[in-house]
Amino acid sequence: MQGLMQRRDLMISSLLDHAARHHGNAEIVSRRDDGTRARSTYAQLSRRARRLAQVLHGLGVRPGDRVATLAMNSDRHLELYYAIAGIGAVCNTINPRLAQDDIAYIASHAEIGVIFADPDFLPIVQAVAGTLTGLLRHVVTLSDEAAADCTLPGGMVLHGYETLMQGVSGAFDFPSFDENTASALCYTSGTTGRPKGVLYSHRSTVLHAMMMNFADTAALRAVDRVMPIVPMFHAQAWGLAFAAPIAGAALVLPGRHLDPVSLLDLLNRERVTVAAGVPTVWLGLLDHQRRTGARLDTLQRIMSGGSAFPRALIAEYEAQGIACSHAWGMTESSPVATYNAPKPGNAELDGEALLDRKATQGRAVFGIDVRAENDSGEAPWDGKTPGNLVFRGHWVAGGYYREPETAVGPEGWFPTGDVGVIDSEGYVLLTDRTKDLIKSGGEWISSIALENIAVGHPDIAEAAAIAVPDARWGERPLLLLVPREGCSPAPEAVRAFFRGKLPSWSIPDRVVVVDSLPHGATGKILKTELRRIYAA
């Protein structure tokens, strides 16, 4: 026997419909590059997303087509989120911080026919366009008019966003279709080798957005003013672009100026109550406050993720009356899988013990299950026994886009690549990584990529890259190298050798020349030993 309840497919467009109907006057504030702030509402977002849907049809975009964005957090990027998914196409948010070779690979792998780009990122489009001949048809500048100084290969047409928007009526109704239809495509470089595509669905996105508003997660309310500092190209801004409209919370979108001075000014001027970003953002903001004595006037809650949130940082913000919550997950989990919210057992803790609990990655949210696995099976929840962390749930990837192999293990458990412990209350604490990746400021850096470039230097015989702790970025890469016989490579010359081959933020800060590197029985470099020696 089945229930007699109505069924409606979970559509991303329904989030916008709800916001426009029940929270139509709630604000969307978008800071432009010149510092001015554009103001709109959810009712206006709904109307403009429908106009944009018509623009997409005019550009030849059809259901299932992938449409790319190279953009920071703005009202126009938000319109793209809803319009692309709303017509049944797939929004491929490309990280502009990646190396150009990876960006070209993503656009080719996703078979991108249309790219929407912030003016600052047009040089990237120009640089990769030659590799996309016959595939890329349209480039749209997210500005009033097309950029006059941007040239593209033959067959590609450059447009201005607002010019296109003025050419349509906006008389469009978003269709309803199967909720399992793909909605967005985010590529992760959190593995060695080429980026891998995570293909979200309408169902997974709506469920994740609903979860974000649980009382023990972000718990957004109509009276909140929310600033996602985390980029919209990073796992869909942690779902906040979808969660805020459900609650009717105002959205404050900071654009590309993410320095502490600009952020603090915008946080205060727009009376932001909830903000989300990686620990690097919060460390820089706190340093600015220490130097200047500036205050955060309205901020009540911070959501942090991407890398460990330092205990000292939590203590200093909470001394200002600002609650700090750590979340954990990855692009493959949409991304939130755990969230640090209190349980009754926290009442028994105080001082350092309570701070230790707050510094964990949190506990599994409803819709996700997490466990640590070792050779004996599931590791006990004792806060001591480590294991490889795996999770599964309604918004966890079951595989990668256009990859023949599956990403999940038996019974649907997805291997995260992290090692950690789970305590008796279910709080997860990351302790290590199963691979030798370096996570700096929330961005992954491949040690293998660093090593491959290093050994291409004519004076270097062997190299190893490891992560070392960094107060600002969480981790930074340290490169250890063995010179070729008779050679004496200078560290700064080696760092210069990396420029242009990788994004600047992934170049090692320090290069150390050594006589030899430790090897194991199979000839592999013992990075565990290197980390033990150089961790300090």
Image (cartoon, grey):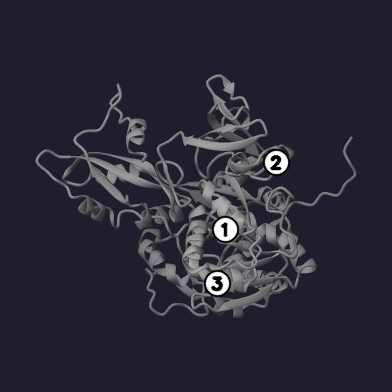
Dot 3: element: helix
Q: Secondary structure at mark 2?
A: loop
Q: Is residue 432 visible?
A: yes
Where in the figure is residue 340, as x and y percent of width and height?
A: 64, 45
**Residue named by callout 1:** 91
**Marks 2 and 3: which is nearer the front?**
3
Q: Hey, what amino acid is under mark 1?
A: Cys
Nearest-to-viewer mark from 2 and 1: 2
First of labels 3, 1 by sequence position? 1
Q: Residue at x 56, y 55 (%)?
A: 316
- Marks 2 and 1 close (CB-CB < 8 Å): no
Q: Nearer the viewer, residue 391 or 309?
A: 309
Q: Which residue is mark 3?
A: 265
Which residue lies under the disc numbered 2?
Answer: 367
Using the image, determine if residue 42 lies above or below residue 531.
below
- In the image shown, does 213 or 458 lie closer to the viewer? 213
> Which label number is shown at residue 394?
none
Quadrant where the N terminus is found in the figure:
top right
**Counting residues from the N terminus, which is met first, the one under dot 2 or under dot 1?**
1
Q: Between 348 and 383, which is closer to the camera in this rendering?
A: 348
Disc 2 marks which amino acid?
Answer: Gly
Q: Residues within 10 Å of mark 2 (few under 14, many from 20)?
A: some
Q: For numbered disc 1, what is the local secondary structure?
A: strand
Q: Check the image and name the residue furthest to the top.
A: 376
